[in-house]
Image (cartoon, grey):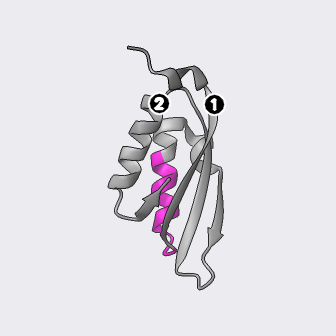
Amino acid sequence: MNDPLESAFPCEFPVKIMGRSDGAVRMRTAAIVARHFGEAAGAAATERASSDGTYVALTYTVTASNRAQLDALYRELTACDEVLMAL
C-alpha cells in the first residue's frame, strides 16, 4: 500500500530540537543531522536560548527525500542523551 504522504516529498522540513545549553547538544545534533542529510545541513542551524539561558532550541531545515529518512533522523535524535525533545 502506498503512503499518501510520500507525494509530498522531496520537501524542506524544519527539525526542531531542545536541549540543555551546555554546548554538547549543538555538536551532537549537528553530527546526527549531517549523517542523514549531509554536512551542509548539519552546519546550518538557527539557535535560540531560553530566557534564563538553561536551554537551547535548535532548528535545522533539511531537504527530506522521503518519510523513512525523517523517521531515521528522529529515531537517532531521540536516542541522543543531550536531546530533551525533537519535533
Find out whether residue 30 is within the magenta segment: yes
Find out whether residue 38 is within the magenta segment: no
Residue that label 1 marks: 11
In x, y percent, where is residue 65?
55, 26
Numbered label attached to residue 80: none
N-term-proximal mark, 1 vs 2:
1
On the image, which quarter does residue 85 sit in?
Answer: bottom left
Q: Is residue 24 left or right of residue 53?
A: left
Q: Is residue 47 left or right of residue 17?
A: right
In x, y percent, where is residue 5?
52, 26
Q: Is residue 14 above or below residue 37?
A: below
Please say whether residue 10 is visible from this viewpoint: yes
Q: Is residue 10 above or below residue 79?
A: above
In x, y percent, where is residue 22?
48, 75
Residue at image point 47% right, 37% down: 70
Residue at image point 60% right, 77% down: 50
For this rendering, which residue is in front, 55 or 40? Answer: 55
- Residue at the extreme bottom of the image, as rendered: 52
In x, y percent, where is residue 24?
46, 67
Please say whether residue 9 is visible from this viewpoint: no
Callout 2: few (<14), some (14-19), or many (20+) C-alpha neighbours within 10 Å?
A: some
What is the span of residues highlighted in magenta in the rendered image?
21-32
Alpha-carbon distance for marks 1 and 2? 10 Å
Residue at image point 34% right, 63% down: 81
Q: Is the N terminus in the top left, top right, bottom left or bottom right quadrant? A: top left
Q: Amino acid at mark 1?
A: Cys
Residue that label 2 marks: 67
